[in-house]
Image (tube, helix red, strand yellow):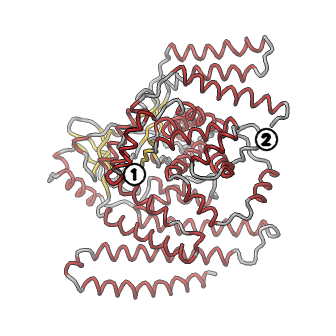
Amino acid sequence: MALLLRKVRTIFLGATALTAGGSAAYILSDEERRKVVPGTLDGSWRFARTSLNAIITAVDYKYSLYGLNKEADEIQYKQTLTAANLRFAKRLYKVCHSHGGLYNKFAQYVSTMNHVLPNEIVDTLSPLQDKAKEVSPEVAAEAVKSELNIPHLNDIFLEFDPEPIAAASLAQVHRARIKDGREVAVKIQYPHLRQQTIGDVATMKLLSTLVGWVFPDFNYSWLVREFEDTVILELDFLQEARNAKRLAMMFSHRTDVYVPEIVDDLSTERLLVMDFVRGYKPTDTEGLISAGLPRDKVAKTISTVFGDMIHVHGFVHCDPHAGNLLVRHKANTSSWWSQFSTGVGMICVPALAITGAFHAAAVAAVISGTFALYNQNKDPLYELVVLDHGMYRRLEPNFRRLYCQLWESLLLRDHNLGRRTAISLGVSAEDYEVLSLIFTFRSPKHKQKMGTRMTKEQRKELREKFKHVTHADVNSFMKRLPRDLLFVSRTSNIVRSLNKSLGGTTRGRFKTMGESAVRGLTLENSKLLEESINERKHEAICQGAYRINLPVASEIDPPHKPISEIIEVFRLRFYLEVIDRIMLVFGYR
């Protein structure tokens, strides 16, 4: 096996050397082309290395598992597959760490999929969340001076740590102190990244087109175009600053969410300066425990914040991996409202128990929980710090409401509403079950309490039902879905991963997402109608930053409507805490 892989590598590198040599000769024959030699040769090498590792991985899996029966040789098959997964993950880590940029962003996304991928892949790639390949201190310093148009760093900074504290896919961050004494984080974009990104996107387009040509069922070239638009926006740090300020305003009513303040005078398209924040990553279990930070409550806060981004605001941070979030201590004070909502729960439980009410604790949870909805950690022990505001998505207003309806139908098991929503989203009524599987990992007709895992019989039934579904069917289904759904799905997957890492429950996450959804339905899009029509008329100028900077419903009609929200949340909680239990007891589900 090892010999075979070495032969593949040797042949491929030989062909690559010939191609690169011919390319270099062509480039050097023209004076104008010499200016782009470094980028072109680097791009050729990156393309070659990526393709080579893809071929090696395919051969590795093919021959490692050759002759093994998944059921008959179960133990050996699993051991062999685990070893192949680990080899693949190490190759992918080396490629992404070496190439950086878009490759690193891809690895970050893969490392958040612990609910789908095996541990050996997730664990190997996780360090790339904030430990990407960095540039030297000298290069970083020159880049900062160039952006600020200053001869020396001490013209602006009292202190500037030459060693980066984090290295992300598109930039690295240094700790510094400016002349007014504030401690700041300086985010500097990697030199030549824009030119490199153009080449990487071209590589992705070419590879996706070739794969689609050889394997038509795997033609996902339509997805690359959407990714390209997003990456272009991420390269503009002034747009990132606008996103950060906008998010801070949207969550200004919460004291458990913090977005670092931007230093506008020192920020450019390639340089972003903001308040420096210390804290623990959500995945740092030992750190959170030693600091006495409540992991279960942090899990709920993350689900609530990103649930509100999606369902209430329709303005979504699409890259909330653990490297982009911090949890820090905050001074705690107790307000009359938190005491009142807690008191309601203390009174309800014994009162309902004395009267013999059915599931008294469940009813008390509904009542006290609904009052506590507006407490929303008014006086928390911690703050969730949201970082890196480059990858954002402004959801289409109609999609936001439809997505809220989808979650409402899934949690209340309103199948008629679910089927109507599926049709409005551009798929068939029968595909409502597929959407349920995507977002809740269970059929909408499952018989257990919401949040519980499917039984072996149910999983077997689903495998039998979908055994004839091909990759072409999956591709066609995804292509019909609104593009917004792809970004929402990414954010939801990462939140699911963080919730699991923090010890949160699936049922708790569903409840939190559901509450955001029903509150989002209280927001109408009517005041955005004129803006949406104008957007369609001038579609050419509303792409990219222009489109993402358009207002959303919550900015025009603030979402703080206590009566309507309390009623909707109470209805959802009453169903999940009472009706769901009653029907389970009496065998209706």
In the image: residue 64, left or right of residue 142: right
In the image: residue 501, left or right of residue 356: left
Identify which amino acid the numbered label 1 is placed on.
Answer: Ala
The residue that appears at 32% across and 43% down in the rendered structure is 241
Q: Quadrant of residue 100?
A: bottom left
Query: In the drawing, what numbered circle is on residue 398?
Result: none
Position in image of residue 343 (x %, y %): 61, 13
In the image: residue 225, left or right of residue 575: left
Quickly name the residue at label 1.
166
Query: Which image quarter holds the N terminus?
Result: bottom right
The residue that appears at 44% across and 77% down in the rendered structure is 48
Query: Which image quarter holds the C terminus?
Result: top right
**SS for callout 1:** strand
Identify which amino acid the numbered label 2 is placed on.
Answer: Lys
The residue that appears at 43% across and 84% down in the rendered structure is 16
250, 123: nearer the viewer:
250
**Is residue 13 depicted above or below 84 in this figure?**
below
Query: In the drawing, what numbered circle is on residue 447?
Result: 2
State the CA–CA distance, disc 2 to disc 1.
Answer: 46 Å
N-terminal of the two: label 2 or label 1? Answer: 1
**Is residue 333 depicted above or below 589 in this figure?**
above
The residue that appears at 53% across and 59% down in the rendered structure is 125
Q: Is residue 171 visible?
A: no
Position in image of residue 106 (x %, y %): 48, 60
